[in-house]
Amino acid sequence: QVQLVESGGDLVQPGGSLRLSCVASGFTFSSSLMFWVRQAPGKGLEWVAGINTRADRTRYADSAKGRFTISNDNAKNTVYLQMNSLKPEDTALYYCARAKSWFAGNDWSSYLDWGQGTQVTVSS
């Protein structure tokens, strides 16, 4: 069955960096649409970044542009999210998700599978 397992979340000070990882199994990772989605305390889901693992294309939400980088390693079935210049408003539970549409964005019906999430807390 499909599994998405995130890791790398932590408590970090404002301005710091973190790299999240998501190891996938149960499907053909090398030709998939993989996204990072987050949920801040008391708020709804928000898509952050996406990658086409076959074409190495990426897209970002405005909140992530210039600070976050999504990448993948097909040999390891892993997608990463490098987060730099972190702000308190980046505090959230970060989910790895597989989508059926490149334009999934905040259309939650376009997502096929979800991980359990990894917590990122940005605070001094």
Image (tube, rainbow, N blue to C red):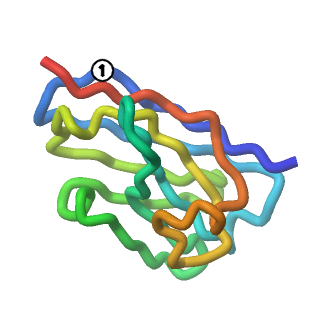
Residue 87, by quadrant, is top left
Q: Quadrant of the C terminus?
A: top left
Location of residue 120 by image quarter: top left
Residue 90 spot, x, y in % from top left: 26, 39
Query: Horizontal and vertical percent for residue 35?
Result: 52, 59
> Where 121 falls versus 57 (above or below)?
above
Q: Residue at x 45, y 31 (%)?
A: 8
Q: Residue at x 64, y 51 (%)?
A: 76
Left/right placement of residue 87 relative to residue 106 reads left
**What residue is pinned by disc 1?**
11
In the displayed structure image, the side of residue 32 where residue 59 appears, left or right: left
Amino acid type, label 1? Leu
Q: Which of the two residues, 91 or 17, is positioned nearer the viewer here?
A: 91
Point 54% across, 67% down: residue: 107
**Depicted 25 relative to depicted 115: above or below:** below
The number of discs equals 1
State the image coordinates of residue 59 (x, y, percent, origin top left): 38, 72
Picture layout, residue 20 above or below residue 121: below
Q: Nearer the viewer, residue 29 or 34?
A: 34
| Name of the residue lying farthest toward the bottom | 55
Horizontally, residue 99 falls left or right of residue 10, namely right
Give me the residue at 31% from left, 36% from top.
Answer: 18
The percent position of residue 51, horizontal first and vertical second, equals: 49, 68
Element class at badge 1 = strand
